[in-house]
Amino acid sequence: MPTTMTADENKQIAQTIANQIGHLTLLRVNARKMSFSKNDLTFRVGNPRGRIKAIRVILEPSDTYTVEYFELIGSGVKLGQKVVSQVVEDVYCEQLSDIVISMTFKYDIS
């Protein structure tokens, strides 16, 4: 994998991750506000009126994924401090959907 990637390449990786998770899974967990950066896809999940919870899926050089579930705390300008609740490493693409669902409903009690 090249060390510097273009925005289009990063967007393609994010689209591939979303496709591997699956459209129905993303609907089921109420995924929204998707964003991407280098080798990852981040999206909010769960109840939009509760705390801000999100999942970040990172493509690793080993062609596996690391999946993080976290909450954003703070308000207004200070919003964005990340508190990671769970990290799963060495995830294969066929496991993404199950892990995203499990993380979302395990922690979504709002």
Image (cartoon, rainbow, N blue to C red):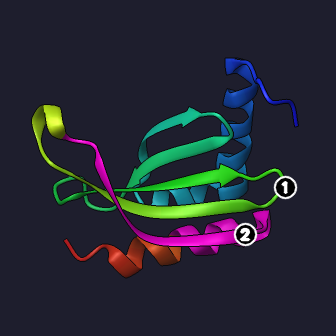
> Badge 2: how crowded within 10 Å, few (<14), some, or many (20+)?
some
**Residue 40 located left or right of residue 107:** right
Q: Which residues are magenta?
A: 79-100
**Which image quarter is the C terminus in?**
bottom left
Name the residue tied to disc 2. Answer: 91
> Which amino acid lies under the numbered mark 2 shown in the image of this protein?
Val
Estimate the spatial distance between the alpha carbons at disc 1 and disc 2, rounded to whole Å.
Answer: 9 Å
**Residue 63 located left or right of residue 34:** right
> Which amino acid lies under the numbered mark 1 shown in the image of this protein?
Asp
Which residue is found at the position 65% from the left and 62% from the top? Answer: 66
> Badge 1: how crowded within 10 Å, few (<14), some, or many (20+)?
few
In-front residue for pair 51/86: 86
- The image quarter containing residue 100 is bottom right
Residue 1 place in picture, x, y as percent: 88, 37
Residue 60, placed above or below residue 66? above
Residue 25, placed above or below residue 34? below
**Which label number is shown at residue 63?**
1
In-front residue for pair 2/57: 2
Residue 37 place in picture, x, y as percent: 58, 33
Question: Does the magenta segment cover residue 2?
Answer: no
Residue 26 place in picture, x, y as percent: 52, 56
